[in-house]
Image: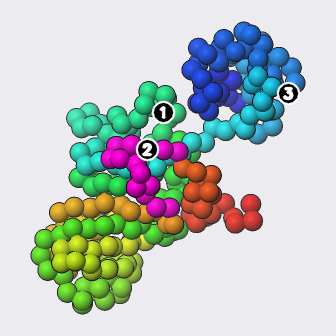
Amino acid sequence: MERIDKLLANMGLGSRKEIKAMVKRGEILVNGAICKDAADKVDVTSDVVTAGGRKLRLRTSFSFMMNKPAGYLSASRDERDATVMDLLSEEHQRLGLFPAGRLDKDSEGLLILTNDGAFAHALMSPRHHVDKRYFVRYDGILHEHAVTAFESGITIDGGERCLPAKLELLEPGEAVVTVQEGRYHQVKRMIAAVGGRVIYLKRLAVGPVLLDETLRLGKYRELTDEEFQTLAILSGLWRSEE
Ligand code: URA
C-alpha cells in the first residue's frame, strides 16, 4: 500500500504539494469515490485511481538509463566522491533509485538506474548472462590471437576464468568487447591479459538495449516499456508470454 500523494508525485503527476491541492479540490477519485485525504493509502495492483477524470496507470517501479560520465561512482552514496545520484534531479532523487550494475569511476556510457529490487537483482545475476557491450580504447598492440583467447575464455590475474567473450578489433587501439558477466574491472583485466591497457571505456549496450546516443554525458531518461520488458524477459524476471 502506498500513500496516494507520494505515489502520484513519483509518477510525475505533480509535486506532493500539487497533489495535496488536487485532493483538496476533489479531483482525485479512488475506486469511484472522492479521495479526502492525501495520506490515504492505495493498492497499486487493484485500486483504480482517476485524476481530473483521467484513469491513471499506477506504478511504483521506475527504471532509467543514464549516459554516465567519467568521474562519478556507480553507487547510491559515498562519503568522498560524487556518485551518479548527484546527477539526478530532486524529483528523481526521491524515487529511491540505485544503479543496477556497475561502471568504474572512469568509465562512461549506459548505466541502468532503478528502484525495482527484483529487476536489478535479475539483471545483475551472474546466472542470467545478460551481454554487456563496451567500446574500448587501449594502449599497446592486440593481435588476432587475442580474439580467439577471448572466445575460449580468458584467465585473468592468474586464476579467474572468464566465460567466453567477444573481442572485435577495430582501428589500431580501438575495440569492441562483449562480456556475459560483470566481474570487477573485468574488461580492463581481460584486455590486460592479452597485452593491452584500457585508456577509455564506454558501455554501449546491455542485452539488446542500446545507449541512447542523444543523451549527453550525465543525462538520463526513463526506459521505454519495450526496453524494460526486453530486459525483464532476458534476465528471467518475466517469462515472454507474460
Ligand atoms: N569492465 C571494466 O573494467 N570496467 C567497467 O567499468 C566495466 C566493465
Distance from disc 3 to disc 2, alpha carbons, whole Å, reads 34 Å
Indicate which disc, 3 or 2, sits on the residue closer to the N terminus: 3
Residue that label 1 marks: 92
When the figure is inspected, residue 35 is found, relative to residue 85, above or below; the finding is above
30 with respect to 147 (left or right): right
Quadrant where the N terminus lies? top right
Q: Is residue 221 above or below residue 227?
A: above
Report x, y in % for residue 53: 80, 25
Q: Residue at x 86, y 20 (%)?
A: 33
Which amino acid is tagged 3? Asn
Q: Confirm or deny contact between disc 1 and disc 3 (CB under 8 A).
A: no
* Residue range (magenta): 209-222
- Residue 88 visible, this orientation: yes
Looking at the image, the residue that sits furthest to the left is 140
The numbered mark at residue 31 is 3
**Residue 183 relative to residue 80: left or right:** right
Which one is nearer the viewer's eye here, 42 or 171?
171
Residue 76: percent from left, percent from top: 38, 39
Mark 2 surroundings within 10 Å by alpha-carbon count, few (fewer than 14), some (14 through 19), many (20 or more): many
Q: Residues within 10 Å of mark 3 (few under 14, many from 20)?
A: few
The answer to whether the residues at label 3 and label 2 have Cβ atoms under 8 Å apart is: no
- Of badges 3 and 2, the one in the foreground is 2
Left or right of 161 on screen, residue 207: right
> Residue 241 at what x, y percent from top left?
75, 65
- The residue most toward the right is 32
Residue sitting at 62 percent across and 52 percent down? 225
Q: Which numbered disc, 2 or 1, marks the residue that appears first in the sequence?
A: 1
Determine if the C-beta at disc 2 is less than 8 A from ligand 1: no
Q: Which residue does the image show at 32% across and 79% down from the upper left?
A: 167
Q: Looking at the picture, which amino acid does disc 2 mark? A: Tyr
The residue singled out by tag 2 in the image is 220
